[in-house]
Image: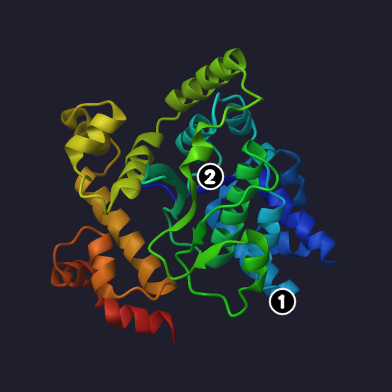
Amino acid sequence: MLASGTTRVGGMRAVIKVLTELGFEATPLLKKVGLDQVILSDPDMIVPSSVFGELFVHCVKTTKCDHFGLLVGAEGALAWLGRIGFIVRTAPTVEIALRSLAKYFHHHDRSVVMELREADGEAVLSYALLFTMEAQDQWLGSMMYYSLKIMRELCNPAWLPFEVTFAMPRPADIRPYQRVFRCRLKFDAPETAIIFDSHCLRRPLESADPELRRLLLKDIDECHQLVCDDFPLDVKRMVRAHIGTGHCTAKNMSELLGVSVRALSGKLEESGTSFKQIVEDVRFEMAKQLIQNTGMSLRDISERLDYSEISAFTRAFSRWSGIAPGNWRRCMRV
C-alpha cells in the first residue's frame, strides 16, 4: 500500500498571508483541518497533502473567492522550496534549473509529479497530482501561477508563456486567469502545463554557483538514501510521468531508475506492492481525475491511459471502482 502524499508547510504561509490580506482570521480555518499556527514557524515541517486540499475548501467557502488558489500562487517564489530553491537558482541554465526542480520537487511535495519536455521549438512544464484530493482546481491554479513566478525569477519579470492548460473545468469567471497568464488558456485539457518557447531553456543564469550546487546536490541525495519508503513513490512518479507515452514498461522504468528489472520487482515486493499494481493505481487515479475534473470523452481518456480500446478501459475502471466510468462521472457531478 503506497503512502499518501505529504507537503512541506512552507507554502502554507502564502495561504495565511492571502487570508490576512482579504481580512480573515487564519487560526479558525487552520483548526478546522487540525493544524495549529505554531506549525508554520518551521517551513520544513510536513503535513498530509489532503490537509492542504481541505484548507483550500474552507478558504474558498469563507472568502467566497473562487480563484483563491491563484492568489496563493501569486505569493510563490523559489524561496518557498528551501534548499530545492537554492539548487534551482545555482544551476547554470534555465533548462538544468527546471530539470532539477522536476527531479527534486518531491522533497517539497510528495503528491505532485513535475515533468519538463521539449519538442518542435516548444517546452512544456507539466504538473500532475498523484493522489485525488479536494479543491483540485485551487491546487492547480496555485501551481500554475507559481510556475509563472518561477519562470519570471529565472528569465525576466515580464516573461510570458505561449499557453497554459488545465486538467480541470473552465471556471465560471476566467478573467482572473486571463489577467494573470496573459496568453492562450485551455481548460478540460489532458494535463496541467505551462507551454513556452524552448529558446528560454538555453538562457544562462547569473545566479549559477557550481560549488554551492555540488554541495546542495550531495546533501539532498544523501537525505534521499536515508528515506526507506521512497522507492515505491519514486516508481509511481516515474510511471505517472510516462503513462500515455507507450513506453511505460518495467524494463524502461528500471533503466530510468538505474536498477535491474529484478531489483525493481524485488524492492517493490519488499514494500508490499508490484510494478503492475503501481501502474494500475496510477491509471485509476488519472482516470478519476480526468473523468471528474475535465470534459474529455471516455475514448480520449482511455487513449491517454495507454488503452488500445475503450472497452478495455471500461472493464478496468469497473473493476477498480465497481461502477462503469460513465456512471461514475454522472454520480460525481450530481
User: Could you classify mark 2 by the number of other residues whose Cα lies within 10 Å: few (under 14), some (14-19), or many (20 or more)?
Assistant: many
Residue 249 vs 187, above or below: the answer is: above
Task: Inspect the image, locate mark 1, and give the three-letter code of the amino acid beneath it.
Answer: Lys
Residue located beneath label 1 in the image: 64
Q: CA distance from mark 2 to mark 1?
A: 27 Å
Q: Position of residue 238 (x, y in %)?
A: 33, 42
Residue sitting at 28 percent across and 26 percent down? 258
Q: Is residue 309 left or right of residue 35?
A: left
Tag of residue 208 = none
Q: Position of residue 109 (x, y in %)?
A: 53, 44
Residue located beneath label 2 in the image: 109
Q: Is residue 3 visible?
A: yes
Residue sitting at 27 percent across and 42 percent down? 272
Placement of the C terminus among the 4 image quadrants:
bottom left
Q: Position of residue 41 (x, y in %)?
A: 76, 41
Q: Position of residue 278 (x, y in %)?
A: 27, 49
